[in-house]
Amino acid sequence: METQTYTNPAKLTGPQPEKSRLRMDKLLQDRVYSLSITIVVICIVASVVFPQNFPTFENLSQLLLNLSIDTIVAVGMMLLLISGMFDLSVGSMVAFAGGLTANLMYFHGFPVPLAITIGLLSALLVGWVNGYLIAYQGINPMIQTLAMLGILRGGALLVAGAGIQNLPYWFNAIGQSRLLGIQMPVWYMLLTVAVFSFLVNRTIFFRRYYYIGGNAKAAELSGIEVKKMKQFAFILSAVLAAVAGILLTSRLGAAMSTLGRGLELRVITAAILGGASLTGGVGKIVGALLGALFMGIVANIMIIARISGLWQEIILGLILISAVWLDLYLIRRSRA
């Protein structure tokens, strides 16, 4: 009796074109992967075009220092976007927390640790209020956080006035000291990204934000305390913004009520570029870093190329529009 041998056609013909195409599409839709490649290409081109200015240690370390504040705030914004929400008050929180901390030290003689603690507690209270009114009272996140933006900006004017300088040495050392030649805010940024990347990727509690962003009603029916988790996300966002504001004030050695203007749009853009979606349910914390890095590199190149500040604002606005369009395009494609 003859025996027949069956051979898998895939072994003879290699990977099927359809599977290869689907695999490539999935890889390209991974914003962390595609954005990383884009950043590498831009850096190579910038190094060739501006060899005396861009690829220097001084320029790259300054670039990282400039984006460190945005990235810390963007981590909190990424968590909110994953859960299907956002916070427009983070820029004002940066100014208020820094101004309040400086005010307590300069005018009232508070010790540095106590002043910083009160600054962070004020952010916790603001985040609690935002989260409570949005999660429990049903106020639209845009309306609530836009109102809080105005309140905090006015509060920053009250506590910081025209500016507060001559802050204590030990406070300034937090943001001005260096490790391996790089200022400390960069290390704080990397630590923040590393910690929250671990929490979101490895802990059940933070993984629940993906379910909330994907379908809040289904998440609540499955036993997740959606309202409490939403409120906690706003608290984290406000506290991270306060940390960024205190670091920025320390780095500058002065508190100003104008700090953080426009920051909310930059961090939302960075988060969307890094893989977040306005509809919620997707995103990676490291994407916030990559999005901020991309925008920082573009801004740095424009400065080196001596492009007018007016055009810089226009270009950054176009990047925001492009990021939103890309988000919508990928959503439509995934549903097709």
Image: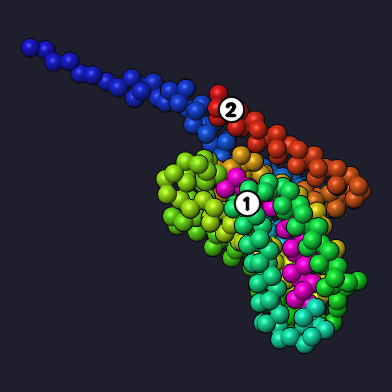
Which residue in the rendered view is the most extreme toward the top?
A: 1
Observer-nearest residue: 267 or 310? 267
**Which residue range is magenta in the image?**
77-102
Residue shown at the point (84%, 64%) measured from the top left: 154
Observer-nearest residue: 66 or 245? 245
Closer to the chain start, of discs 1 and 2, is 1
User: Which residue is denoted by mark 2 in the rendering?
Assistant: 333
Asked if residue 81 lies in the magenta stretch, the reply is yes
In percent of width and height, residue 227 lies at: 54, 53
Question: Which image quarter: residue 38?
Answer: top right
- Of the residues tagged 1 and 2, which is closer to the observer? 1
Task: Please determine whether, in this image, residue 35 is positioned above or below residue 103.
Answer: above
Residue shown at the point (34%, 25%) measured from the top left: 11
Observer-nearest residue: 41 or 296? 296
- Determine which of the numbered discs, if any, sits on residue 137 in the image: 1
Q: Is residue 231 left or right of residue 73?
A: left
The quadrant of the image that shows the C terminus is top right
Amino acid, disc 1: Gln
In percent of width and height, residue 293 lies at: 69, 53
Amino acid, disc 2: Arg
The quadrant of the image that shows the N terminus is top left
- Tell me, yes or no, if residue 166 can be seen here: yes
In percent of width and height, residue 182 lies at: 69, 69
Q: Secondary structure at mark 1?
A: loop
